[in-house]
Image (spheres, rainbow, N blue to C red):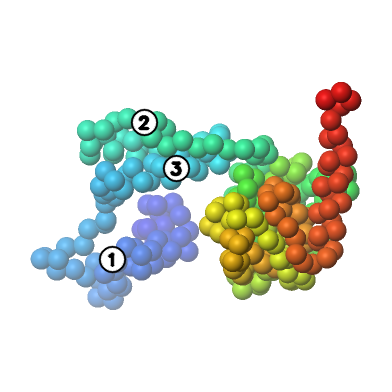
């Protein structure tokens, strides 16, 4: 152990983790030999242990490159320093294993709409604290209240949702789970304190029940009726994991989705208007009517048109 610590210039805990990794993850038959007073690899001449190499078929390399291209497309430049070297290496492997050297960019096209820009330094700080299990102190801009607040949070999960990045975290000021939009972070600093860990079951219960990005317990169920023409698309979509659907005799499509906050649901309904009717609840139907009337009033044709 002393030799390992001296030669590798690491702590005893790091050496033990590496030995555990070799044994448990790499399948190395590593064991302590009391007679030799050292670690030995218990293999046989006919079955020698070797560290696994990284070997991919051309189709596997192409699939990995496609995935990296998709990651880069989430927000250009955001992960460039991390993804770039791996992408270069995979391209080299692909050129060695196949006659096709055409760029992956020419084979996959990504079209993004209205992503909000995140500062790369903020993303790196958040991601590092998340992976290291550390708390974060941040100054956060609240659009609804038009002011900023300072929070100490324990990051739990990064979420990419509808072209934008969010951080699910335990907020120590509110003593509750909250979601933070990364583009609204004005400043962020990782702390030395260990982050509070929220169980996957609690996270699932909190965020999965609501509609879209809005978390919370289910309070209502929306019943929506889509025209036969629009049903061709809606019948192939999943709006909520607990949704129920049915098709009427005239070809119209009924979609029922639970929700806690109607803000995002209203936007989705308006996106399909006038091909959709809110059958229930009455409150949601009234809100949709008010929003559509306000939009119509604001967009009246100019005189003479």
Where residue 105 sits: x, y (%)? 42, 32
Front residue of 208 and 37 = 208
> How busy is the neighbourhood of tag 3: few (under 14 within 10 Å), some, or many (20 plus)?
some
The CA span between labels 2 and 3 is 13 Å
Q: Is residue 190 above or below residue 28?
A: above
- Mark 1 or 3, closer to the camera: 3
Residue under the image location 42 percent in, 37 percent down: 108
The quadrant the N terminus occupies is: bottom left
Which residue position is annotated with label 2? 103
The circle drawn on residue 28 is 1
207 horizontally vs 109: left or right: right
Front residue of 144 and 238 = 238
Which residue position is annotated with label 3? 68
Disc 1 or 2, which lies upstream in sequence? 1
- Mark 2 or 3, closer to the camera: 2
Where residue 75 sits: x, y (%)? 58, 38
The quadrant the C terminus occupies is: top right
Residue under the image location 60 percent in, 52 percent down: 230
Asked if one can make out residue 207 in the rendered structure from this viewpoint, the answer is no
Residue under the image location 77 percent in, 66 percent down: 280
The CA span between labels 1 and 2 is 38 Å
2 and 3 marks in contact (CB < 8 Å):
no
């Amino acid at each position: 152990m002393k030799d390992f610590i001296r030669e590798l210039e690491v702590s005893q805990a790091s050496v033990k983790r590496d030995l555990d990794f070799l044994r448990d993850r790499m399948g190395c038959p590593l064991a302590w030999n009391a007679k030799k007073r050292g670690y030995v690899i218990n293999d046989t001449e006919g079955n020698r242990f070797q560290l696994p190499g990284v070997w991919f078929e051309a189709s596997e390399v192409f699939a990995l490159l496609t995935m990296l291209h998709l990651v880069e497309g989430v927000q250009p430049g955001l992960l460039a320093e991390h993804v770039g070297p791996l992408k270069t290496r995979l391209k080299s492997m692909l050129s060695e294993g196949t006659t096709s050297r055409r760029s992956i960019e020419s084979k996959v096209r990504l079209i993004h709409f209205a992503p909000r820009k995140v500062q790369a330094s903020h993303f790196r700080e958040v991601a590092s604290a998340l992976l290291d299990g550390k708390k974060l102190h941040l100054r956060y801009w609240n659009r609804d209240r038009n002011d900023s607040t300072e929070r100490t949070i324990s990051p739990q999960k990064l979420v990419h949702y509808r072209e934008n990045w969010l951080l699910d975290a335990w907020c120590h000021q509110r003593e509750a789970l909250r979601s933070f939009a990364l583009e609204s972070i004005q400043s962020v600093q990782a702390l030395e304190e260990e982050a509070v860990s929220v169980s996957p079951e609690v996270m699932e219960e909190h965020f999965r029940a609501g509609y879209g990005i809005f978390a919370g317990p289910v309070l209502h169920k929306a019943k929506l009726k889509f025209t036969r023409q629009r049903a061709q698309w809606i019948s192939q979509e999943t709006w909520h994991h607990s949704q129920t659907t049915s098709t009427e005799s005239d070809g119209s499509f009924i979609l029922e989705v639970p929700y806690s906050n109607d803000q995002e649901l209203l936007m989705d309904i308006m996106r399909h208007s006038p091909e959709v009717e809110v059958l229930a609840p009455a409150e949601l139907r009234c809100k949709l009517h008010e929003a559509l009337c306000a939009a119509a009033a604001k967009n009246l044709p100019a005189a003479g048109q």
